[in-house]
Image (cartoon, rainbow, N blue to C red):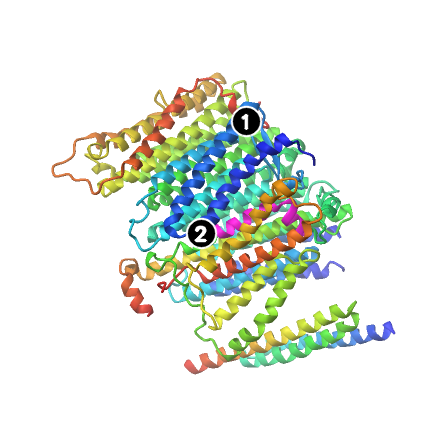
Amino acid sequence: MSMLPDLLLVMLVLGAALWTVAARDRRSSVIGFIALGLLLALVWMRLYAVDVALTEAAVGGGATGLLLLRACARLDSIDAGKPSAGRTLQLLIGFCCAAMGVGIAAAALGGPDLPPTLAPAVAANIDAVGLGNPVTVVLLAYRAIDTLLEKIVLIAALVGVWSLAPDDVWGGPPASLKLAKASEPLTFLAQILPPVGFVIGVYLIWNGADEPGGTFQGGTVLAAMWLLVMLAGLAEPPETRRALLQYLVVFGPAVFLISGFSGFWLAEGFLSYPTGFAKTMIVALEVALALSIAVIVAMMLAGPSARTPR
Amino acid sequence: MTAGAATIDSGALLVVSIMLPVTGMLAVIVSPARRSEQVALVILAASLLTAVATAAEVLRTGEPIEYLLGNWRPPLGVALRADGLSVTLMVMASIVLSCVGLYASGSYLAPPDAHHSRSRTVFWTLLLGLSVALNTAFLAQDLFTLFVALELLTFSAVALVALDGRPTSLEAALRYLLLALAGSVFYLVGTAVLYGAYGRLDLSGLRQISRDDLATTFALSLMMTGLLVKTALFPMHLWLPPAHAGAPAAASALLSALVVKAPFFLIVLLWTGIAPRPFSVIAGQVLAILGMASIVFCSVMALRQSRLKLMIAYSTVAQVGYLFLVFPLTIGGTANLAWSGCVLQLVSHAFAKASMFLAAGVIAEVMGHDRISNLKGTFHAVPITLTAFALAGLSLIGLPISGGFSAKYMLLTAATEIGAWWIAGTILVGGLLAAGYVFKVLGQALAPPAEGFAAARSIPLHRELVVLVLASAAIAMGFLPLDPLPFITIGRMGLP
Amino acid sequence: MTMFWDAMTIVFVSTGVFFFLAGTVGLLRFPDTLTRLHALTKADTLGFGLIAIGLLPQSADVRVGLKLLVIWLILQFAGACSGQLIAQFEHRSRHSS
Amino acid sequence: MSDVTTLYGLCASGLIAIGIYGFSLQSEPLRRIISFNLIGTGVFLLFGVAARRAAAAGFLADPVPHAMVITGIVVAFAATALTVALILRLAELNTDPEENIQPEARDEKSA
């Protein structure tokens, strides 16, 4: 009986996934995917992963959804879908995929009765850092290198997106995000919501030290507010060659690098924090990173330059 | 959590080798386009020095260098570790990156007076991105950190493939990106399963506790499949030739020489470090069979190409196939010799192939096209480049004296000693086919120019010299003694 | 005293859930976009307000209660604006076709 | 409680299987990148299940896989953004082949 809600949730998730794959046109598929993102946020809550649930809602349902919806809108005016494979091939591949799923389930769910875990190790070392949210400690202390490299991945992808601009508009602003049918309610929302959203974003970042939340969740909320303003046409995307924009993109990672290297002199080596200052440094780092993330995510959604720089 | 002062000093080298190009990337983004080249070249030179210093340190002490990031011990933290093999690859990668950087300096990417700086900023940023990704892949000791490095490698490489912005290049880049992402996701499934089974992802820990059970075998098979897609082994090579065809020569050189090698290195890590015994034997056989199929099939494909760049691209798939022959050869007493052959093949192919792609770039510029049937007079126009092409070709074929010869000789000896005649036969057939496609080009290019031939444009000398330097490096590897290389076994886990 | 608050929570939240249910049935049963929208927005606004009121007595301290109120306010905004947007889109596409 | 974890493990495997099916059968790049994201969420869920199985050791969940999933979600977003940008640029070029040759013409159009 106690499993009933979970069972229902799993059915919904799998249903949304099937819909996403099987939907006839791509817009329905995208909508299925966004719904899936929201359902998954619930799943993550059930798995006691509030930080991941926030990230999934912000990115899976939010940022990725917006990205895909905009792509649909622009593709619809260009080309129609293509025919899919024959029935025999479908059956064959379907069978292989099912076998694969069974294999993964067997491999992932078998194993020892008392599964190995790093949870005790995290708990034992958390006092040395002084933060209350273990996920933030993993992200910014134990596995800080992953987080640093992840920012570099984001920057590389952003440069990749920018690189798709035609030569003659390089450095110019991306295409306007303003919706053709932008209307009063949207404008109203874009005027009212950003201050609130800004506070929520900052709250998520600040709170991330001790409770669920953190840089990426907060940064994405900030990006969403900026995007909302641009969607309503109250602001235009900036020129990608603007120095301020470029400095904002590298600001977070640069601060991360400097704090990492300062560990050589102030603490016990690269990416380690001086005793007693870990929390202060991590919160400062999170603020810097969130700022860069907000700019990078928003610019990725805005796409490559499309108009000649002035 | 205590580390001696001495280890911190040499360990800083590992940190610097990853963080130097990171700093460079950030600097290129904020610096004006005309400065981006200088920034990148300075960083590349400094990276080369760091790599050489690291190698010297490992050679001097005969011990691997380890560094705990943030001073957190694995499995909680992530360690960097430089052993003989990884510093060899690091030095190789920095040499190739520096040479390609020099080749692309000046007016290669855009005319000096060009108002638009797109290709310059993008190229230099992502060149440094590749450097970060490669050094991380060679040093990081954690399966998840390696995943992030692989993604960085993919994104940088894809954008370089798409650099010229033509539809065919974009299509090739899109296909490459989708397949590479599929590869990553397979790798990540395996990582998740391993975490569920062992509760840790650090290589040294996994090596000690890996069991021979369903989860481990399944996870490793998935991860290796994903990596095979990224390294473009037959039959998962289909993305590679089109990706090379449209990319600028400098990007193709990096893609063939370095980008496909990092996933191979990861396969070696998994195979030697984590794979339990009965599984590793079977996996080794399967990998070698795919390698052999690559050698034969893609050499034939290379022979049939009419465009120079496509020919070289197919040759890459074939030459990467040789690397996979090593796995069954390490079971017997010839393991050291086989590994030496494999590493030598990896390094000399990197130099030779980078040189060949850069040469193809020069040839295409001079002739205005890259159709093999119409290359008469190339030698007349660019003798230095063509000499380099010929030298690189020698190494690919495996003619003495060259790195390719030593490598294939070692693999051949190892194969015959344990009676693996099928591997020995493939090595010989591959050499013959390689001779076929290299001489097909040389025969055309050495012929005297037709009446009224004029070079489409002149090439700055430094670019031709870079091509020659790379080819000479491939040849120079042939002067190493034909014995197992002691250097690469320093600190290698899982090697005999 | 706690029993009174608990009873209040139960009453308000169940009523709220009932309105949600009614709204969803309306979404499924009504024939066109505008009527569906009508069912959904009305019922959800009411249902959500009731649930928020019902949860207030359960909040551990004033901060949690305030957060609940803020969430309620934001949802009011979002619901009102998106309802307007959908209606406007529907209106325009009807007139253009 | 472990039954619930098993249930989500099956859900994760199902997501991966559905995603791979879509990825291998669809021809439209946009649909394929959506399928890629499905596989991705399935894999992340697998990490989540591994984390939740730590409950046996008396913890709510293991935060290390959670951190990895957050990093993974970010990387998957970057991948999707790059792919979508490539798809859109390609579609743009295919509808308007002259665009690359005559930049002036486009400027007039957009102005």
Residue D34 sits above or below residue B448 on the image: below
State whether residue B273 is above or below residue A292. Answer: above
Q: Is residue B136 left or right of residue A111?
A: left
Residue C29, disc:
none
Region in magenta? A135-156
Q: Quadrant of residue C11?
A: bottom right
Q: Chain of mark 2?
A: B
Above or below — where is B157 with respect to A208? above
Residue under the image location 33 percent in, 52 percent down: B166
Q: Whole-Å distance between the Cαs marked 2 and 1?
A: 34 Å
- Could you classify mark 1 by the number of other residues whose Cα lies within 10 Å: few (under 14), some (14-19), or many (20 or more)? many
Task: Tell me which amino acid carries mark 1.
Answer: Val
User: Predominant secondary structure in magenta?
Assistant: helix
In this orientation, which residue lies closer to the viewer: D14 or B205? Answer: B205
Q: Which quadrant of the view contains residue A78? A: bottom left
Residue at figure coordinates x 52%, y 79% from the top left: C87
Determine whether the residue tagged by mark 2 lies in a helix, strand or loop.
helix
- Picture coordinates of residue A137, whole percent (x, y): 67, 49
Q: Residue furthest bottom?
A: C95
Q: Which chain is indicated by disc 1?
A: B
Give the residue number, with chain letter if any, for mark 2: B29
- The crowding category of the residue bearing disc 2, from other C-alpha atoms within 10 Å (few below 14, some 14 to 19, many at least 20), is many
Q: Position of residue D70 (x, y in %)?
A: 61, 53
Question: The residue under label 2 is which amino acid type?
Answer: Ile
Task: Note whether D30 is above or below B126 in the view shown.
Answer: below
Is residue B145 rendered magenta in the image? no
Q: Residue furthest right?
A: C1
Residue A18 relative to residue A73: left or right: right
Q: Secondary structure at mark 1?
A: helix
User: Which residue lies under the disc numbered 1?
Assistant: B58
